[in-house]
């Protein structure tokens, strides 16, 4: 029977389809019947299924031809998602979804788009593809939220990771799809298919980047046009941008889209890529692998995975256009470079692929560079050979694009720098590159140059034949015309070979003469690089070639070149080398000579070079003696190396000249004149030629050379030469005069020196120099000739005379008188002193004059004007002559000690440290007098220039005297010793001078003084110095009217001497070490004046003192280093510079800071809270510098203390300290963030454990905003960096951060929230919660939550529960809820044991008065139930049911709906599992009736959403949960709350109404019993719904109710209950009860008329309306009366309506009441208003329809006649009512009914003529009716009446 019914139903549908004539009708039928028809496909009856198929075929034909017909897509989607539906039904359902969805209006498609996504869940792949193909075109039109905030998702994809992945895969295929692509079968193009390498038979050729399957699913049944495809791609980009797809998931799509051929797509994607590329983790292996997969496609590998890949799923590589977009992103990734073999495949594809181009090759080469730059050694080793092969192949074969070739060459260089072992044995590659550089253009040549420069390192270990071959290669390419080739050859020559490799040095010397600066500059830089004692090469025996070997090699090469085309011709002379090369050869040979002599070669100045001359002389003499002793060393024609060196010098000097060459020749001859000068006696004129050149320096050097050669001559030659010089000095050109004067001075000086040494045994000389007595007359002439030029007009001649006299005075007594007529010594002194005060004289002249004055007492022990000379020097002080005063100081020292001076030595032969004055020499020491003068007169002078100058003189004296131990034993030293305290006092007084130089000089002097004293003296000196510095006593200076208080430019500085604070600090530093004497060392080392860097300053040799001090201070370093380190950051610049100098001198070991790290750290931490602001500031700055680059173990022990102390200092009273603390905190933060990495292992764990308590307990809750800010920033960054290290601390970290969400929120927000309206408050609180969720603290929490598991949850959950229950503040509570959601999503399994506790805690917060918090907690429960045990969830729903039914507060009602709705949204499966508890509650909630008077809003929409989402239609849902629904509504009806009762009544009524057509036992009885139970009792608002429900049920199910069924009330019982309600006093309720019972009685035909008569007749009879004549002044009373009057009228109408409907068919009852009822109705027709008339007429019509007198069986004509008489009389009133046509129409209807009944029963006889006339009159009056239809009806009735016999 059931099958037949189904077939019948289908037939009816078929028929209705067939009868549908218009599209609208067809659409209506389809909308109604298509879903249920599809459900019939699940029928077990074959016939039914066939019928359905037949119907669907018909339907398809109709639909396809009518594209505008809409299908019920929304219903079909719901049906499609039904988990109970069989696959047969879903398969057909999706067909109609696919057919109907594109027909929908676009806004409807957008509305249903989320449903499409939801429908994809757990569906077959093909169906998912179909749904996605429907979805993609819609995405462009979907309106996304304006702001991309968390939680504002259209598609709610957060809970559907699998669907998201499916969507992203499909979207990628869409983005890869080219425009206008047509899917062709391979048969049409088999050859092409084979060429393309399509595997598998019968597969279509897919586009690049796609598989055959992917292309088919994107193309689908209806391929998109190009414009549609463009729109789809734009829609995908909008979707990715708006739906919060993680950037790491979406970046691949954006990159692919940015390569699109349509501008709109590419531009949009490019912008999005740029906006997010900064936050993309390009080293994420998932991203990298995706990019590689798209780039390369599915390359078939000989692996299981490769073999298992189906042909239709094999992806092709992408097009070149996409590759060009992918490669730049691979260049950002270290991971991409390390991924093998994909990286090599990409390189080879880009270089040699079939579809590559120049741009792709360029990017591929950049990728090679990237691989070489970032790939670790262990991973690049296997790649090296492949990379090199590919690059060399490209270089050999590809010649098109210069830029590509350039990159290729550079890449080879990069490979060589990473893998030198690949290149070491392959010299052919070097040669190839050199050759290429010769041939290629300039752009490529530059790249080859760069590559070769990087390749150099690979060949540094060559040996044997390879080294020889490289030597030949370099030599060959050094001569090439291309400058870059020569430049690289120089690089190879300098790097590949050892620094003492002679052939390579020779090559560099040749290159030094190159015309191009870049070549000769590099060569000279290498050649002149001085050996550094701190380099690793220190251990090698030589770093320069041995002098003899280098000279011989040069000589051999010179002899070869002189006869080759490489020779250099200048005029008539031929040189083997060009001048530049030759000059460099000479300098290099000089360096080799100095190196072989055991000194460090230098070429900075001739003065520095001359200091090395004695050592070189010793070496030359040894070399000469060895050469002469063993002639066998000169075999093979080798000459003496010294002679060869001289020959080279002479050759170059003759041809080209040059100062360095002349100096080198002078030096080599002067150091061994006995053997080497004689050869030049024949060339005296050649030397003389150089004495008249136009260069002063050359003339001076030539003059010295001439004097040396002259000193070896004898006899007439000597005399002639001297006379010739005198003549030249008088009568020649100025240049010749200058040279002659100098030569005479040097010659006489050498003569006087020899004379002074006569009879002495000179060591280290093999034979005495030839001594020819210079005749007194000739000597006199010479002296006169020289002195005559002292006052010459020519400054150069005056200077020459001055130098000559100085040289003579240094070596012996001047051969002139002391005093008297002529030029005397007295006049000489006066003349020289006079030059010092002349402003026209140059500084050079003054320096020479001072130097000469200092020399005079050295050679003449009996010089009579020694003190006059000294006094004159001391009185010559002028302003701004600082450098001159150093010369004066040196001259005073020389003049004071006289013959004992070091200046008396032979400068070429004797070193300063080796010189000792002869014992027999007369002493002319006046040091005591000089000291007295300086100390008593100049040091205390009121003139600051005198004080400054005297400080320099005093320093010079102490310095020079302290170095001569022999002098110390002399009385003069005793004098010095007696002056020690005075000297120290003088220096101390100078410490407070305003100029820095005086301070610095004084500090140096103090150190020297201390070294000179005995132990007792030292103790006294220390106490004096400490006392003076610490008490601030200063030497009093006498003031006069000429006293200059400030030097020029010193105004603006502190006149009390800022420098003094520096020395106080030094003293304090020494005192703290309990070693006050160390203050001298510190002062010596604190040299911060630039003067010490000058040549004169450097002469004082303080670097030696620093070395000694370093040794003495070594035991105190552990105490010194911390203090010195801190002082380097002192705000006082003087202290800072001084301490930095001490630091640089003492702490030469670079690891000293590491060594004393603990001590430094302790000192800094202690002083961070010093009471001196500058100490605090320097400690902060020092801490900032110290922490940089530290390891965890270095600082872990003091880390917490550092943080806490810096937090305190950040709130310092002084701004500069605050800034320094801020800098230190930032550095500390940065260091901690870097160190908090999982890769640091146990150290990282310790660091996090120490760090977090500081930040959480102190930093975040600090009242200082900056401290809070840096704490939060540090926490956020640590959370990103630390990863799993946070796991052990998550239980503490998360609750603390949650509390801070509210603590750190501005308190003004709470105030505003309290003052706002409810609506404003809700909006504000939502915004506050969103802000809290996006805050840095929440970001940190999210990072921590990533690493939570069961081990963490045990500690975390109790604290979280406590916060959920007792947390204060919106942010904290909302954050807690968010954490619960996160945990539930991330680790539901681990959370399961704790879910009950959490649920209990969250549940307690659901009663919060803040709606925003309630919503957040509800969402938390919505997620949490997934992890909870079923029993806990069941208890939850029971609790919610109890709250809803028993708690009357709106807060609880709101909590219930929010919670259930959240569970429905986030855990719909839980709702279904507990549907028995949840859905009845939702159904009841749907019928909530808000109290608008109290401003309540309805939550029924939220309840309805839960209900509709979880039931198969409302009808089916009620049927399914009937018992539960009845139970809950009964509970509601029994509630103490009237509102709940009304809600229960509405729900019960809804059940009854929706089930009326299909209620059968037992449900019928259950519903009726429930309704009747609810009706019992007093009246309350909303109870009417129950009455209506009963009426609905009974009227619809009257037939079923006639049957007797257990537990099912009878109709009689129902009516009795209803009648009882009709007696209630509440008039409105009573009316509803009457209407309901009327409907029941009308339907059931039951006779309860008498009961109603008892109720209603009195009402009708009583309601004779009498108009009130009273006029009330009170308007309210009038309104009240009007309302009552209207209510009575409604009651009256209700009474008539009820009586009409309840009019029974029982004869007895009719007989009893027919006349009375008719009479009452007729009476009311006459007296009432039109509304009452209309109601009476309607009741009358019902009355006559059921009147038995008008039936065939009736015989009582008299009764009928009486009734009709009253009726017709009464009907005239409505018929003649001209105002209301409805009244007239109803009256005509009654007449028509009566006429019809009378005609049928043939009872016209009862109608008397009187009655006819009345009616005719009334009908005639209607002939003029304004309504034609009434007029016609009246006319018809009139005709009918007229035709009656």
Image (cartoon, rainbow, N blue to C red):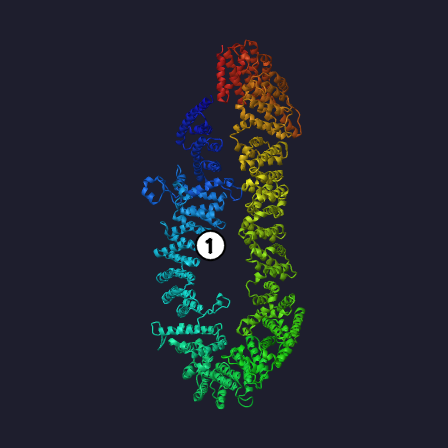
With 1270 as the anchor, is 673 left or right in this view?
Answer: left
Residue furthest out toward the top: 1755
Disc 1: which residue: 376
The number of numbered badges drawn on the structure is 1
Regarding residue 1280, the answer to whether it shows in the image is yes
Camera-side residue: 150 or 1757?
A: 150
Q: x, y percentage for residue 1831?
A: 49, 20
Camera-side residue: 1660 or 742?
A: 742
Q: Secondary structure at mark 1?
A: loop
With 714 as the anchor, is 1608 left or right in this view?
Answer: right
* Quarter of the figure with residue 58: top left
Q: x, y percentage for residue 1671?
A: 66, 27
Position of residue 1808 relative to residue 1240, above or below, is above
Regarding residue 1504, the answer to whether it shows in the image is no
* Quarter of the figure with residue 498: bottom left
Position of residue 348 relative to residue 1679, above or below, is below
Q: x, y percentage for residue 615?
A: 49, 76
Q: Few, some or many C-alpha atoms within 10 Å of disc 1 (few <14, some 14-19, many ≥20)? A: some
Q: x, y percentage for residue 750?
A: 49, 84
């Amino acid at each position: 029977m059931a099958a037949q019914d189904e077939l019948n139903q289908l037939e009816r549908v078929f028929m209705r389809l067939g009868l549908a004539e218009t599209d609208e009708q067809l659409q209506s039928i389809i909308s109604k019947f298509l879903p249920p028809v599809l459900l019939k496909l699940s029928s077990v009856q074959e016939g039914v299924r066939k019928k359905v198929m037949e119907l669907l075929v018909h339907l398809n034909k109709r639909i396809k031809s009518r594209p505008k017909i809409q299908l019920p897509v929304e219903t079909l989607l719901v049906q499609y998602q039904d988990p109970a539906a069989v696959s047969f039904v879903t398969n057909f359902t999706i067909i109609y979804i696919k057919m109907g969805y594109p027909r929908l209006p676009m806004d409807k498609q957008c509305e249903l788009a989320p449903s499409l996504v939801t429908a994809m869940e757990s569906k077959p792949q093909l169906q998912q593809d179909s749904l996605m193909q429907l979805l993609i075109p819609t995405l462009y039109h979907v309106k996304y939220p304006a702001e991309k905030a968390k939680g504002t998702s259209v598609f709610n994809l957060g809970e559907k990771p699998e669907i998201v992945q499916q969507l992203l895969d499909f979207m990628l295929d869409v983005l890869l799809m080219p425009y206008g692509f047509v899917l062709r079968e391979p048969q049409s193009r088999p050859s092409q298919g084979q060429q393309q390498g399509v595997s598998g038979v019968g597969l279509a050729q897919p586009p690049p980047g796609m598989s055959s399957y992917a292309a088919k699913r994107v193309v689908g049944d209806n391929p998109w046009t190009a414009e549609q495809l463009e729109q789809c791609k734009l829609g995908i980009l909008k979707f990715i941008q708006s739906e919060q797809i993680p950037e790491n998931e979406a970046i691949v799509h954006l990159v692919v889209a940015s390569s699109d051929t349509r501008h709109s797509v590419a531009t949009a994607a490019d912008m999005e890529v740029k906006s997010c590329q900064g936050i993309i983790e390009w080293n994420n292996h998932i991203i990298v692998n995706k990019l590689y997969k798209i780039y390369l496609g599915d390359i078939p590998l000989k692996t299981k995975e490769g073999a298992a890949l189906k042909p239709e799923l094999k992806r092709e590589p992408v097009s070149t256009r996409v590759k060009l977009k992918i490669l730049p992103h691979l260049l950002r990734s270290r991971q991409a470079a390390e991924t093998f073999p994909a990286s090599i495949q990409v390189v080879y594809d880009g270089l040699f692929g079939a579809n590559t181009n120049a741009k792709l090759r360029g990017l591929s080469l950049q990728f090679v560079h990237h691989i070489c730059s970032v790939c670790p050694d262990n991973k690049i080793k296997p790649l090296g050979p492949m990379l090199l092969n590919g690059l060399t192949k490209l270089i050999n074969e590809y010649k098109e694009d210069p830029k590509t070739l350039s990159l290729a060459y550079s890449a080879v260089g990069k490979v060589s720098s990473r893998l030198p072992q690949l290149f070491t044995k392959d010299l052919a590659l070097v040669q190839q590159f050199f050759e290429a550089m010769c041939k290629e253009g300039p752009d490529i040549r530059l790249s080859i140059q760069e590559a070769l420069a990087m390749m150099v390192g690979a060949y540094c270990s060559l040996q044997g034949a390879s080294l020889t071959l490289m030597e030949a290669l370099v030599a060959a390419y050094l001569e090439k015309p291309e400058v870059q080739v020569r430049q690289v050859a120089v690089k190879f020559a300098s790097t590949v070979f050892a620094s003492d490799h002679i052939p390579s040095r020779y090559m560099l010397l040749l290159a030094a003469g190159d015309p191009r600066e870049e070549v000769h500059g590099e060569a000279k830089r290498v050649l002149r690089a001085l050996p550094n004692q701190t380099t690793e090469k220190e251990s090698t025996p030589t770093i320069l070639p041995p002098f003899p070997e280098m000279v011989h090699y040069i000589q051999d090469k010179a002899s070869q070149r002189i006869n080759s085309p490489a020779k250099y011709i200048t005029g008539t002379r031929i040189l083997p080398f060009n001048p530049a090369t030759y000059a460099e050869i000479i300098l290099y040979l000089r360096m080799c000579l100095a190196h072989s002599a055991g000194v460090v070669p230098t070429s900075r100045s001739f003065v520095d070079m001359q200091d090395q001359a004695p050592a070189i002389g010793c070496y030359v003499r040894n070399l000469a003696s060895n050469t002469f002793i063993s002639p066998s060393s000169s075999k093979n024609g080798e000459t003496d190396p010294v002679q060869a060196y001289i020959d080279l010098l002479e050759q170059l000097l003759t041809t080209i000249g040059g100062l360095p060459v002349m100096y080198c020749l002078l030096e080599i001859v002067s150091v061994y004149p006995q053997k080497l000068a004689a050869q030049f006696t024949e060339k005296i004129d050649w030397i003389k030629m150089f004495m008249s050149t136009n260069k002063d320096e050359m003339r001076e050097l030539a003059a010295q050379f001439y004097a040396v050669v002259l000193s070896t001559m004898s006899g007439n030659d000597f005399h002639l030469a001297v006379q010739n010089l005198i003549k030249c000095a008088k009568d020649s050109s100025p240049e010749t005069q200058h040279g002659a004067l100098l030569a005479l001075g040097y010659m006489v000086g050498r003569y006087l020196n020899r004379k002074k040494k006569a009879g002495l045994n000179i060591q280290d000389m093999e034979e005495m120099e030839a001594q020819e007595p210079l005749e007194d007359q000739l000597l006199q002439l010479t002296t006169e000739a020289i002195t005559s030029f002292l006052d010459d007009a020519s400054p150069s001649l005056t200077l020459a005379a001055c130098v000559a006299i100085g040289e003579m005075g240094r070596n012996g007594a001047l051969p002139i008188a002391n005093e008297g007529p002529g030029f005397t010594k007295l006049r000489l002194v006066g003349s020289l002193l006079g030059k010092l005060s002349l402003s026209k004289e140059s500084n050079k002249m003054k320096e020479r004059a001072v130097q000469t004055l200092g020399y005079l007492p050295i050679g003449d022990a009996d010089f009579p004007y020694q003190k006059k000379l000294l006094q004159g020097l001391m009185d010559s002080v002028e302003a701004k002559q600082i450098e001159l005063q150093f010369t004066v100081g040196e001259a005073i020292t020389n003049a004071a000690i006289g013959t004992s001076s070091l200046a008396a030595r032979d400068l070429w032969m004797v070193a300063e440290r080796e010189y000792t004055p002869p014992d027999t020499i007369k002493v002319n020491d006046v040091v005591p007098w000089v000291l007295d003068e300086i100390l008593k007169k100049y040091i205390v002078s009121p003139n600051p220039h005198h004080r400054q100058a005297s400080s320099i003189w005093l320093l010079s004296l102490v310095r020079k005297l302290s170095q001569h131990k022999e002098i110390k034993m002399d009385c003069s030293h005793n004098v010095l010793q007696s002056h020690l305290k005075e000297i120290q006092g003088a220096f101390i007084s100078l410490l407070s001078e305003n100029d820095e130089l005086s301070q610095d000089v004084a500090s140096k002097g103090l150190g020297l003084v201390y070294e000179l004293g005995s132990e007792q003296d030292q103790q006294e000196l220390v106490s004096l110095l400490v006392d003076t510095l610490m008490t601030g006593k200063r030497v009093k200076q006498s003031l006069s009217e000429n006293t200059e208080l400030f030097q020029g430019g010193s105004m603006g500085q502190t006149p009390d001497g800022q420098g003094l604070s520096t020395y106080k600090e030094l003293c304090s530093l020494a005192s703290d070490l309990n070693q006050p004497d160390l203050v001298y060392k510190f002062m010596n080392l604190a040299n911060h004046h630039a003067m010490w860097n000058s040549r004169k300053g450097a002469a004082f040799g303080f670097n030696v003192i620093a070395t000694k001090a370093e040794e003495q201070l070594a035991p105190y370093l552990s105490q010194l280093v911390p203090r010195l380190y801190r002082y380097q950051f002192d705000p006082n610049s003087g202290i800072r510079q001084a301490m930095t100098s001490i630091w640089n001198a003492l702490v030469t070991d670079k690891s000293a800071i590491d060594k004393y790290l603990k001590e430094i750290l302790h000192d800094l931490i202690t002083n961070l809270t010093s009471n001196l602001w500058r100490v605090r500031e320097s400690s902060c700055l020092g801490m900032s510098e110290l922490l940089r680059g530290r390891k965890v173990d270095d600082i872990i022990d003091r880390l917490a203390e550092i943080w806490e102390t810096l937090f305190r200092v950040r709130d310092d009273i002084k701004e500069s300290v605050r800034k320094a603390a801020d800098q230190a905190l930032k550095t500390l933060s940065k260091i901690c963030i870097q160190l908090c990495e999982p890769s640091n292992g146990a150290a990282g764990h310790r660091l996090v454990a120490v760090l977090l308590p500081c930040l959480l307990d102190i930093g975040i809750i600090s009242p200082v905003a900056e401290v809070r800010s840096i704490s939060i920033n540090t926490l956020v960054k640590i959370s990103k960096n630390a990863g799993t290290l946070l796991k052990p601390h998550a239980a503490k970290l998360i609750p603390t951060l949650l509390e801070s969400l509210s603590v750190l929120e501005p308190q003004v927000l709470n105030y505003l929230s309290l003052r706002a309206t409810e609506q404003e408050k809700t909006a504000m609180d939502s915004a506050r919660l969103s802000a809290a969720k996006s805050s840095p603290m929440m970001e940190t929490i999210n990072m921590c939550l990533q690493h939570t598991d069961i081990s963490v949850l045990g500690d975390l959950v109790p604290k979280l529960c406590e916060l959920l229950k007792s947390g204060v503040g919106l942010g904290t509570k909302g954050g807690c809820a968010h954490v619960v959601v996160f945990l539930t999503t991330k680790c539901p399994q681990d959370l399961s044991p704790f879910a009950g506790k959490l649920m209990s805690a969250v549940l307690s917060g659901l009663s919060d008065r803040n709606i925003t918090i309630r919503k957040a907690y509800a969402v938390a429960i919505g997620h949490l139930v997934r992890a909870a045990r079923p029993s806990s969830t069941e208890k939850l729903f029971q609790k919610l049911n109890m709250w809803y039914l028993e708690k009357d507060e709106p807060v609880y009602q709101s909590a219930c709906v929010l919670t259930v709705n959240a569970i429905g949204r986030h855990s719909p499966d839980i709702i279904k599992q507990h549907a028995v508890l949840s859905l009845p509650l939702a159904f009841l909630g749907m019928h909530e009736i808000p109290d608008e008077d109290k401003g309540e809003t309805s939550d029924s929409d939220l309840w309805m959403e839960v209900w509709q989402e979880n039931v198969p239609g409302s009808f089916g849902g009620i049927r399914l949960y009937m018992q539960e629904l009845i139970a809950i509504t009964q509970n509601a009806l029994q509630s103490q709350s009237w509102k709940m009762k009304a809600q229960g009544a509405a729900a019960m009524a809804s059940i009854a109404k929706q089930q009326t057509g299909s209620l059968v036992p037992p449900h019928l009885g259950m519903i009726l019993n429930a309704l009747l139970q609810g009706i019992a009792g007093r009246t309350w608002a909303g109870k009417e719904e129950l009455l209506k429900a009963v009426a609905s049920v009974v009227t619809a199910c009257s037939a079923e109710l006639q049957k007797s069924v257990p537990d099912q009330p009878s109709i009689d019982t129902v009516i009795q209950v209803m009648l009882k309600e009709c007696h209630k006093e509440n008039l409105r309720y009573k009316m509803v009860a009457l209407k309901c019972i009327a409907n029941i009685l009308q339907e059931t035909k039951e006779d309860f008329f008498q009961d109603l008569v008892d109720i209603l007749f009195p009402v009708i009879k009583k309601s004779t309306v009498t108009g009130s004549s009273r006029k009330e002044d009170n308007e309210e009373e009038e309104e009240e009366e009007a309302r009552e009057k209207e209510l009575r009228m409604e009651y009256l109408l209700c009474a008539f309506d009820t009586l009409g409907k309840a009019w029974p068919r029982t004869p007895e009852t009719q007989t009893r009441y027919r006349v009375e009822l008719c009479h009452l109705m007729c009476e009311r027709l006459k007296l009432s208003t039109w509304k009452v008339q209309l109601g009476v007429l309607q009741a009358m019509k019902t009355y006559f329809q059921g009147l038995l007198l008008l039936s065939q069986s009736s015989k009582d004509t008299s009764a009928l006649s009486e009734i009709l008489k009253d009726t017709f009389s009464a009907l005239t009133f409505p018929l003649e009512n001209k105002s209301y046509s409805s009244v007239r129409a109803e009256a005509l209807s009654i007449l028509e009914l009566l006429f019809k009944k009378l005609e049928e029963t043939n009872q016209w006889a009862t109608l008397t003529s009187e009655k006819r006339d009345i009616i005719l009159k009334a009908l005639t009056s209607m002939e003029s009716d304004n309504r034609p239809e009434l007029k016609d009806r009246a006319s018809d009735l009139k005709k009918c009446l007229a035709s009656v016999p």
